[in-house]
Image (cartoon, grey):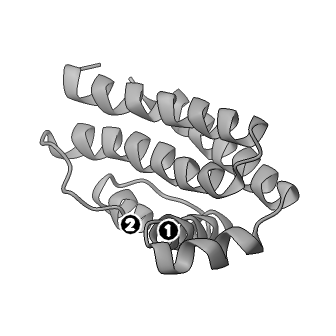
Amino acid sequence: MNKDVRYWYNISKYDIETAQAMFKACRYLYVLFTCQQALEKIIKAFVTLETKKLPPKLHNLLRLAELANLNFDEEEKKFLEKLNYYYLETRYPEYKEKVAAELSKEIAKKYLVKTKEIWNCLEKKLP
């Protein structure tokens, strides 16, 4: 694994661990935020592999997956789209409270489990 791919992988792994820590701390808004970040960064590892360049400064998981030539099924695409929503909405204070009020332990756990499932699958595909 080259150094740039390893960089994206390592910070992605840190983010998935942070998502788990946020779940234990009952900070559900940040569970979803760091789930998105974990997938964004591991997908950026694949963009780096595919293009032989550093990935663009994008946060859209579906667009990054296209650049990396990663194929997700329709259910996974809908999940990634929803994570994009939570990532964007949690970045802006005027939406943060609204989004936080929508979240529960069950929702956060569902997103964490699915994120880990996708993340583990992608990790196995890395050289």
Residue in view at x 68 percent, y 35 percent: 20
Where residue 48 sits, quadrant-wise, is top left
The x and y percentages for residue 121 are 60, 37
Q: Assign a secondary structure to mark 1.
A: helix
Quadrant location of the N terminus in the rendered image = top left
Name the foreground residue: 120 vs 71. Answer: 120
Name the foreground residue: 81 vs 49. Answer: 81
The x and y percentages for residue 9 are 39, 29
User: Disc 1 residue type?
Assistant: Asn
Quadrant location of the C terminus in the rendered image = top left
Mark 1 to mark 2 CA distance (whole Å) = 6 Å
Q: Assign a secondary structure to mark 2.
A: loop
How crowded is the residue under tag 2: few (<14 C-alpha within 10 Å), some, or many (20+)?
some
How crowded is the residue under tag 1: few (<14 C-alpha within 10 Å), some, or many (20+)?
many
Residue in view at x 32 percent, y 52 percent: 68
Where residue 2 sits, quadrant-wise, is top left
Horizontal placement of 106 versus 80: left or right? right
Q: In this view, does 108 lie above or below 125?
A: below
Furthest toward the left, the residue is 53
User: Disc 2 residue type?
Assistant: Asn
- Mark 1 in CB contact with mark 2 (< 8 angstroms): yes
Disc ID at residue 60: 2
Q: Is residue 66 above or below residue 51?
A: below
The x and y percentages for residue 89 are 50, 74
Q: Name the residue under label 1.
A: 84
